[in-house]
Amino acid sequence: MQSKVTDIEPKIIKGCVKGSLKYQEILYRQFYAYGMSITLRYTKNREEATEVLNDSFLKVFENIKKFDTGKSFKSWFRQITVNTSIDYYRKTKRMIQTDDIESYGKYLYNPEQIEDLEVEDLLKLLNYIPEHYSIVFNLYEIEGFDHNEIAEKLKISDSTSRANLSRAKKMLRELFNKQYYNTYAGVV
């Protein structure tokens, strides 16, 4: 019977199911960049992201027999990687010292600023807000989870998830305004 996997060759999955190191390496290389793009959103540096990604691949290889070949491997891999990232966050919950967002001052929002915003800029700004805010922002805005799912994953209440998202957006807006104001208006 022909496999329905469309985003990866079925023989790679079959090889991984059999425990072939050759096929595990092929799978690792094929999905490394994609996985890294996910883990970097949930960690503060490349070293942590690599650790989380490697843990994700271990889970993939341990559970590859459970993968439904009628579904997208990429989606299954993403789910494992996001969950592993959240597990890492819960395990290492750090108290991060951040500047008071009010100290950045108030800047008027200029709709034209958005034209200059790149995805990379947003991802960089996420590193400057408290981790628990950036995690909720990632899960809600990028991964598409609802507040009930986020609350369950992070072991927080729905209202805490909503509040964290609101605070993350406020901080990101103000950081963006500060960045734009300093960079484009010539203010130091």
Image (cartoon, rainbow, N blue to C red):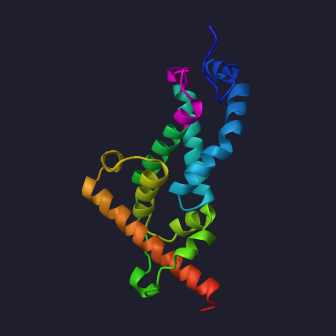
Residue bounds of the magenta highlight: 64-77
Residue found at the far front of this picture: 112
In-image side of 167 versus 36 (left or right): left
62 or 186: nearer the viewer: 186
Q: Is residue 100 visible?
A: no
Expressed as whole percent of the image width and height from the top left, the position of residue 44 reads 54, 62
Query: Would you place residue 74 above or below residue 117 in this image?
Result: above
Residue found at the far top of this picture: 1
Identify the residue shown where x is 55% and y is 32%: 60
177 or 86: nearer the viewer: 177
Query: Would you place residue 117 above or below residue 52 in this image?
Result: below
Query: Would you place residue 61 above or below residue 135 in this image?
Result: above
170 or 164: nearer the viewer: 170
Identify the residue shown where x is 63% and y is 17%: 18
Expressed as whole percent of the image width and height from the top left, the position of residue 183 reads 63, 83
Identify the residue shown where x is 54% and y is 56%: 41
Q: Quarter holding the C terminus?
A: bottom right
In the picture, residue 29 is in which quadrant? top right
Q: Is residue 35 magenta?
A: no
In-image side of 23 versus 57 (left or right): right
Q: Is residue 80 visible?
A: yes
Expressed as whole percent of the image width and height from the top left, the position of residue 76 reads 52, 33
Q: Quarter holding the N terminus?
A: top right
Expressed as whole percent of the image width and height from the top left, the position of residue 23 reads 71, 26
Identify the residue shown where x is 31% and y is 59%: 162
